[in-house]
Image (cartoon, rainbow, N blue to C red):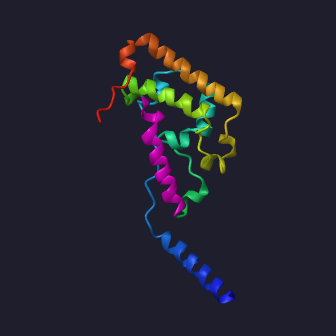
Amino acid sequence: MKKFFKYFFGTIAILLLLAQLYPRPVKNESATVSLNDIGNKYPVPANVEAVLKVACYDCHTSNTVYPWYSKIQPVSMWLGNHIKDGKRHLNFSEFLSYRIAKQYHKLEEVEETVEEGEMPLSSYTIIHRDAKLTEAQKRLLIEWSRSVRDSLKTTYPADSLVLPKRKK
């Protein structure tokens, strides 16, 4: 039995070493603030910015703060895919490049996912304990999202805030 464990763990160690040869994804880091950043058009108060920075921006902007373990495969690949998927759903760094209807819809989704506890993901908050939102932080993000949507409602015609139905 000892021989089995020796070979088993030896094989795992070799596989982990070989995995380090696999190329790492391109880092999600930008040297400048994008012209399409949400804060360039919509007010993001400092207290809201602080919550977004801790709980959202690593996966939903073009500036991820990488932990030390992000250099280790297969974690590097997993994080890269996670960030890519997060930005596909919502990218605060490119928010102003979205059509107005999509901006409005994404802000609705912010409210919905925060309210239902879907964001931030539990896989993220396990390591980043400070990203776990308190009820007060949830209310803050929800109220901010609503206030930006309210400003969109007063600025644009109602029909421009509705995403067109997808054809099947």
* Residue 33 in view in this figure: no
Who's the residue at 49% across and 47% down the image? 83
Q: Can you tell which quarter of the image residue 155 is in? A: top left
Position of the N terminus by quadrant: bottom right
**Res 3 quadrant in image:** bottom right
User: Which picture quadrant has residue 13?
Assistant: bottom right
Tell me residue 50's x, y (percent): 63, 32
Q: Is residue 91 magenta?
A: yes
User: What x and y, as percent, mark residue 55?
Assistant: 61, 39
The kind of secondary structure the magenta stretch mainly shows is helix
Q: Nearer the viewer, residue 13 or 42?
A: 13
Left or right of residue 49, residue 2 in this image: right
Looking at the image, residue 11 lies above or below residue 43: below
Q: Is residue 56 magenta?
A: no
Q: What residue is shown at x 38% (from left), y 29% (from top)?
A: 98
Q: Residue at x 56, y 34 (%)?
A: 113
Viewer can see residue 107: yes
Vertical comparison of 9 with 156: above or below: below
For the point 37% across and 30% down, the residue is 97
**Segment tinted magenta in the rendering:** 74-95
Which residue, as the protein is rendered here, is positioned at the far left? 167
Q: Position of residue 164 (x, y in %)?
A: 33, 26
The quarter in which the C terminus is drawn is top left
Q: Extreme front residue here?
A: 168
Residue 68 sits above or below residue 130 on the image: below
